[in-house]
Amino acid sequence: MEHVEYLYTFGMDEAELERHLREAETGVLSLARGDDAYAVPVGCHFDGDRLLLRLAAESGSEKMSFVEDTGRACFVVYEATTDESRSVLVAGELRATDVEFDETTINEWFAPLRVFDEAIDEVEPVVYELEMAEVTGRRT
């Protein structure tokens, strides 16, 4: 790599991992079914104990089908500039939460829901918890 620019990265300690997860509003959730992969940006909220992910659910959607079929999901939050970067990867079981969240809590904990070409009345915000079985982070 004589002529390729690069930056060294370093692992994060637990305090750094938690800080970056608390600061994150969105990330990319990666799901799988057999040999097929599916990744989607979602809202996130870390309260110190659990990582919650807010998805927009539509009946019959490919995303929700992958959610149901995925055994182990991965979620990444990242930020990068030319000279600095950080990323945190969380992997584990994705499961529906036992708690029903009201609209006020969803609005306080998560960034606004991004809706594409769906009708608003057909989209339901749902909250899942991602088990934090494996958490790793890198920074410059």
Image (cartoon, helix red, strand yellow):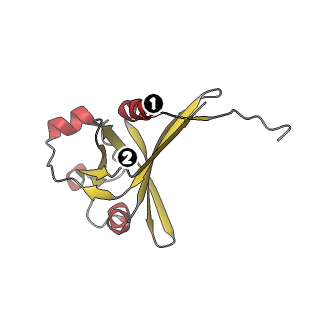
Image quadrant where one finds the N terminus:
top right
**Residue plotted at (76% across, 34% down):** 5
> Is 69 rendered above or below residue 109?
below
Q: Is mark 2 on a helix, strand or loop?
A: strand
**Residue 75 image position (x, y, % from top left):** 43, 49
Q: Badge 2: how crowded within 10 Å, few (<14), some, or many (20+)?
A: some
**Residue plotted at (28% across, 36% down):** 47
The disc labelled 2 sits on which kind of residue? Val
> Is 139 rendered above or below residue 100?
above
The disc labelled 1 sits on which kind of residue? Glu
Number of labels in the image equals 2
**Residue 117 image position (x, y, % from top left):** 35, 52
Image quadrant where one finds the C terminus:
top right
Residue nearest the observer in this picture, 33 or 12: 12
User: Residue 96 appears in which quarter of the rendering?
Assistant: bottom left
Q: How many angstroms separate mark 1 from mark 2 (CA)?
A: 22 Å
Q: Is mark 1 on a helix, strand or loop?
A: helix
Reading the image, the residue beneath label 2 is: 42
Reading the image, the residue beneath label 1 is: 16
Residue nearest the observer in this picture, 49 or 78: 49
Q: Residue 69 carries which label?
A: none
Asked if marks 1 and 2 touch (Cβ < 8 Å), the reply is no
